[in-house]
Image (tube, rainbow, N blue to C red):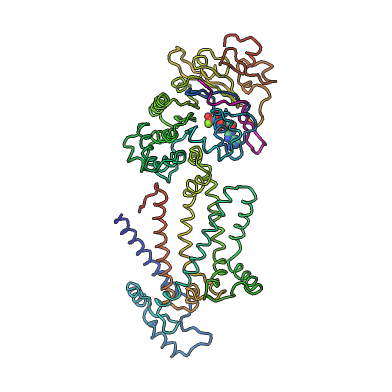
Amino acid sequence: MGKLLEIKNLRTAFKTYAGEVCAVNGISFCVSHGEAVGIVGESGSGKSVTMLSVMKLLADNGRMVDGDILFDGVRLNDYDDRAMQNIRGKSIGMIFQDPMTSLNPVFTVGNQMVEAILKHNRIPRQQAWQKAVDMLKLVGIPNAEGRMKQYPHEFSGGMRQRVMIAMALSCEPKLLIADEPTTALDVTIQAQIIELMKELKNKINMAIILITHDLGVVADICERVIVMYGGIIVEQGKLDEIFYQPLHPYTVGLLNSIPRLNLGKNRLEPIEGQPPDMIHAPQGCPFVARCPRAMKICDMAKPEYVEPSEGHGAACWLLLKGHRGEM
Amino acid sequence: MAQYLVKRFAYSVLTLFIIITITFFLSHAIPGGVYTTEKPLPQSIVNNIKAKYGLDKPLFQQYLIQLNNIVHLDFGMSMVNEGRRVNDIIAQHFPKSALLGSFSILLCLILGIPLGILSALKRDRWQDNVSMIIATIGVTVPSFVVATLTQYFISVRLKWLPVMGFTSFKHMVLPAVALSFFPLAFIARLVRSNMVEVLEQDYIRTARAKGLSRGVVVFKHALKNSIMPVITYLGMLIATILTGSFVIEKIFNIPGLGRFYVESISNRDYTTIMGITVFYAAFLILMNFVVDVVYVLIDPRIKLKQ
Ligand SMILES: Nc1ncnc2c1ncn2[C@@H]1O[C@H](COP(=O)(O)OP(=O)(O)OP(=O)(O)O)[C@@H](O)[C@H]1O
Ligand SMILES: [Mg+2]
């Protein structure tokens, strides 16, 4: 499998009242063709900002200050907004957290789907309409023809997220970025949407980057996991490696804070403390203040990211100092 | 739908009835009358005038007579403009005010909306600052100041446009500019603030994530969502501006309806006061209805109700 997306040392900053604040601070990872990668990490860790940087859809006050983004062999850094328009929606589809607000309330669902298809394909309107109907059927929306003429407010949350997925997939992208696609939905709908994404992934062989808080969802669909904290990647590896041989104390904490029935552990342990203040970014490891195994060095310098085994690594002084111990 | 229209019509008639009643009794409550002139008239003449217009009858009876006339869409004879029916006054002078008003509104829209969009897109940059300074001046400087200043500089000094009158398109330019100054600025600010808010909505990000061009995102997805308050304001604006402005018509000597309205009040021309008020009110009610319908056409979440 070749590399589809390659991010090298990405840094993204926002202008704020307190000057430029780095929300993403040197991130590197790859996604292969057809691979499903999960990005997990608590609120504010920079998951969305990372993917919005790839799409070049950052808010006006944000900019990419450093790094390279290579997608399918081309360097997106050099692309201006006009050039990006041919990537967005066509090669990279994106769906967002809140399906209730992600569709334009004053246009019909059909109108919004067709415009995306027509933007990227030179086909007659009629054919685009038919394509949209087919997509709605594919994502399991009953009475697709009739639904095309309805407005978003006539759909439930789950149905709207299906519409979003249908829209994102309508031009057969090579990569689907799903930013917390199920967070706003209730549990049964959540499961349906994840099931749908899994099914579609196999059907059209596209890569997925799934951003989520929910490790359960990650376990369900992803082959690889990236754990983010405070604007950096603290650990990444294959699903099993992350779940069974976590390297970073934050990953360990994350795993302990989710209910896992099969491990016979019945006490959940929340991670104590607050996420780091990005305005006064810590000099050392961003997790130091909450880390149960913090050492002197952690406060003073940032640990390098290292990979003890191929494809599985972490940024933690414990690895660098050689004493890995049981964690 | 039919039920909605019937209900709405009934409410409108009720509203008009209340307006007629209030107008009638208020206008008669103003001291003096048609016969009040600078030099007091002999009592016999006053009595003759009163008899001619039925002003000698008890007030309530006068009220019923006028109500009956209005039901037959006849506002009666003007008490001051000798021999003219109020209906004719409206028919003759309203089109002039309406023409000027339409031109001003067109000006407001084709300049105000783009100005607002530009400001929103270039938020906090010089384009935004310049347009908002213009807009602030627009909402603070009264129209008669604009009118007299432009009249003096452009017509009297530079002689580019006629000073007054209402016989050609050229005559319309300055009064239209003066009339549109405030609403233009107001619309620009309205569009700007709504556009800024809409541009931060999730569905705008979705539209961009689909690869749509900036133009489509702004003019299709954002504009339709930010235009609602402008429609509301426009309903009101059309009703006020089309029925004429006393001040502007006076300054530029335009034979519009606005002047008649104000003069009818100072002359105690009861029938003209009533005629123009009812006409104006009906126009406003109609515009409100149009706004509600346009709302439904623009935003599918809104339903006609009441
Ligand atoms: N427009 C912006 N201006 C200033 N700071 C921003 C902006 N957008 C994001 N940030 C900051 O960037 C950091 C990362 O935000 P991001 O949205 O990527 O977090 P996240 O990991 O996606 O969190 P969540 O799980 O809540 O979605 C946060 O600290 C946030 O405050
Ligand atoms: Mg996010």
Relative to A13, A116 lies left or right? left
Residue A229: x %, y % from top left: 58, 24
Name the magenta segment's main secondary structure.
strand
Seen from the viewer's position, the closer of residues B247 and A228 is A228
Residue lying furthest left: B2
Q: Does the magenta-highlighted stretch encompass residue B187?
A: no
Q: Residue furthest right?
A: A300
**Residue at (35%, 31%) from the top-left corner?**
A140
- The mark total stands at 0
Q: Quadrant of the N terminus of chain B?
A: bottom left
Which image quarter is the C terminus of chain B in? bottom left
Question: Viewer-proximal residue, A153 or A173?
Answer: A173
The residue lying at 53 percent from left, 87 percent from top is B39
Locate residue A20, reporting x and y percent: 66, 35
The relative height of residue A38 versus residue B293 in the rendered view (above or below) is: above
Q: Give the percent coordinates (x, y) of residue B234.
A: 47, 59
In this view, the residue in front, B117 or A135, is A135
Q: Is residue B84 above or below residue A106?
A: below
- Which residue is rendered at x = 56% and y = 66% of the image? B177
Q: Which residues are magenta?
A: A1-24
Q: Residue at x 53, y 42 (%)?
A: B200
Residue A85 in the image: x percent, y percent? Answer: 52, 38
Asked if the stretch drawn in magenta spans residue A5, the answer is yes
Q: Is residue A310 above or below residue B276?
A: above
Is B288 situated left or right of B196 in this image? left
Q: Is residue A170 left or right of residue A16?
A: left
